[in-house]
C-alpha cells in the first residue's frame, strides 16, 4: 500500500541520523528515503551508506555508483519529497 508523500524540510531531514532510536533518512534527487531497512543489504556496508544519512546524498551517491537504480530498490522506503524550509511568517 502506498502512503501520501510527506513534505520533508532540511531541518526534518537533519534529525533523521539513524542514531538515538531514529531512522536514517537520505535525500536523493529530491526524494527522501528511509534507508534504515535497506542498510544491512548495502554492498558498500553500513558506514559508507550512512555518510549520506540525514542529508542530501545525491552527490556522494553519484560519485560512487551512478549506475545503481536506487529508485527501484528503495520504492518501499520512500518517505516523501524534499521541500524548502518554510519562510518564517511575519
Ligand atoms: C556499492 C546501493 C548509497 C557507497 C553499492 C552497490 C549498490 C549500492 C547496489 C553495489 C554496486 C555495484 O556493485 O555495481 C546503494 C543505495 C544507496 C547507496 C541503494 C542509497 C540508499 C551509498 C552512499 C555511499 C555509498 C551514500 C557513500 C559513499 C558505496 C560504496 C560501494 C557501494 C563505497 C562499493 C562497495 C564495493 O564495491 O566494495 N551501493 N548505495 N552508497 N556503495 Fe552504495
Image (cartoon, rainbow, N blue to C red):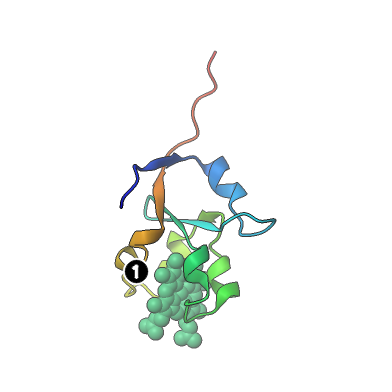
Q: Which residue is mark 1?
A: 73
How many residues crowd mark 1 within 10 Å: few (<14), some (14–19), many (20+)? few
Picture quarter with the C terminus? top right
Numbered label tally: 1
Residue 2, image x, y percentages: 31, 50
* 56 versus 86 height, above or below: below
* 88 versus 84 height, above or below: above
Label 1 secondary element: helix
Residue 63 seen in the current view: no
Report whether the residue tagged 1 is closer than 8 Å to ligand 1: yes
Q: Which corner quadrant of the figure contains ligand 1? A: bottom left
Q: Is residue 12 left or right of residue 21?
A: left
Comparing 88 with 63, the one in front is 88
Q: Is residue 71 left or right of residue 84?
A: left
Residue 34, image x, y percentages: 48, 57
Residue 24 quadrant: bottom right
Q: Residue at x 47, y 81 (%)?
A: 43
Q: Residue at x 58, y 52 (%)?
A: 16
Amino acid at each position: 500500500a502506498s502512503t501520501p508523500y510527506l513534505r520533508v524540510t532540511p531541518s526534518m531531514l537533519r534529525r533523521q541520523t539513524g542514531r538515538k532510536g531514529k531512522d536514517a533518512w537520505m535525500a536523493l534527487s529530491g526524494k527522501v528515503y528511509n534507508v534504515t531497512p535497506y542498510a544491512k543489504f548495502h554492498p558498500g556496508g553500513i558506514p559508507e551508506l550512512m555518510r549520506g544519512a540525514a542529508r542530501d546524498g545525491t552527490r556522494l551517491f553519484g560519485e560512487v555508483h551512478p549506475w545503481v537504480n536506487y529508485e527501484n530498490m528503495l520504492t518501499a522506503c520512500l518517505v516523501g519529497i524534499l521541500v524548502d524550509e518554510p519562510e518564517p511568517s511575519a
